[in-house]
Amino acid sequence: MRIVVIGLGTVGRSFCRLLQDRRKELLSKYGLDPRIVSASDTGGIATDENGLDVAQILKLKESGMSVAEIPQKGSKGKSGKDAIESVEAEVVVEATPTNMVSGEPALTHLETSIKTRKHVITANKGPLALAYPALTELASYNNVSLKFSAAVGGGTPVLEFGRRCLKADKILGIKGILNGTTNYILTEMDTRGISFEDALKEAKDLGYAEADPTLDVQGFDSGAKLVIIANMLLDMDLTLKDLSIQGITSVSASDITAAKENGSALKLVASIEGKASVSPIEIKRSDPMCVSGVLNSVKFISEFAGEQVIIGKGAGGLETASAILRDLLDIRQSMRI
Ligand SMILES: NC(=O)c1ccc[n+]([C@@H]2O[C@H](COP(=O)([O-])OP(=O)(O)OC[C@H]3O[C@@H](n4cnc5c(N)ncnc54)[C@H](OP(=O)(O)O)[C@@H]3O)[C@@H](O)[C@H]2O)c1
């Protein structure tokens, strides 16, 4: 299977590493023989129809260089869109940074992949939060798969659980702690009594929060994930602008104390119960979805199974790459049918 990889940061590189490390098993167990025929970063692209040397890509990226520097194979200044249009491949893996205003450059990468009839897998919630209905319609019209397991919950199979395991049930509502950074901040405010500012600084120092944590602390990251969940699992036609979103920037020590006195903890919860919203709310400490630190949790409320909670790490390079690989194996299976 020929694969174009766009974005070679934490996730893109982990995906390359996973393909390399699991090469034998992928072939023997699933008949999957992946070849990365093109890879892109901000410096340009590298292309080889026989498959690029993954070890060379990883070494180059780890030394801070661009794949465009690969002798004979690299092209400086060419874009991911150029790669998708010019290279013959079955699948595009998109792992560029999230942009919640325009969805770019990922939106163009997804649209170009679909229009050139390539299956596409993304870890990027930006374009899905802004244009889920249009993108899924475009993919269906062009008869290709658009997969995004990694965009919600990192490696934790939140979407897969809802889609596969509750297929015969009716999901009535969903509540989730979908952002590890904000959950870390609220947990530290709760357990150690530190301020929002100090907890945020700590989250940055530990590498949990980005240098610009706006999307996390203002609730947009959770909102984007909720949009994807709502569209995929509840057939709601939502985009980010349809949500009511409140972040955690104004959570005070007294809010945390009040929750404690009620036997609860304050959590940033994304929920769909009738309407879709994101806001800090009290969750009983005895509730299994009341997780600490950077963990994520999602509670499914369904007609027959009642309440079920799925808990796991919401981020991490290899965790997220494993979700991309899961999508790739699904595509491989659908191509054989
Ligand atoms: N990290 C996680 O744990 C995690 C979990 C779930 C989902 N995600 C999502 O996965 C995506 C990637 O995350 P990440 O952590 O891997 O980000 P990252 O470490 O910042 O890497 C981003 C990569 O994209 C490349 N890039 C940026 N603009 C580009 C463009 N216009 N064309 C081609 N390449 C471009 C960068 O190139 P350079 O190398 O040249 O800078 C870099 O290689 C994001 O959308 C993120 O929200 C991440």
Image: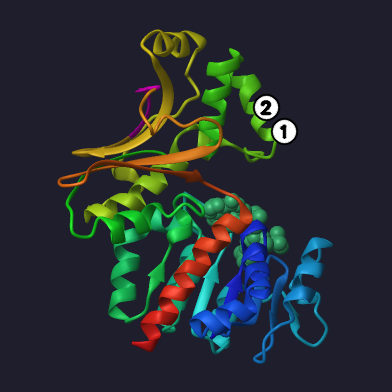
In the displayed structure, 250 sits above or below 18; it is above
What residue sits right under mark 1 in the picture?
205
**Residue 97 in view, yes or no:** no
Q: Secondary structure at mark 2?
A: helix
Where residue 154 sits: x, y (%)? 51, 52
Residue nearest the viewer, comparing 306 with 181: 306
Q: Classify residue 326 as left or right of residue 162.
A: right
Percent coordinates x, y for residue 153 in the rendering: 46, 49
Taking the spot 54% from the left edge, 71% from the top edge, the residue there is: 93
Q: Ligand 1 shows up in which quadrant of the image? A: bottom right
Predominant secondary structure, magenta span: strand
Q: Which residues are magenta?
A: 278-285
Query: Looking at the image, is 273 positioned above or below residue 124?
Result: above
Q: Residues within 10 Å of mark 1 (few under 14, many from 20)?
A: few
Location of residue 147 (image quadrant): bottom left
How many residues crowd mark 2 within 10 Å: few (<14), some (14–19), many (20+)?
A: some
Q: Is residue 286 left or right of residue 25?
A: left
Q: Amino acid at mark 1?
A: Asp
5 or 86, which is in the foreground? Answer: 5
Instruction: State the quadrant of the C terminus.
Output: bottom left
Amino acid marked by disc 2: Lys
**Residue 284 among magenta residues:** yes
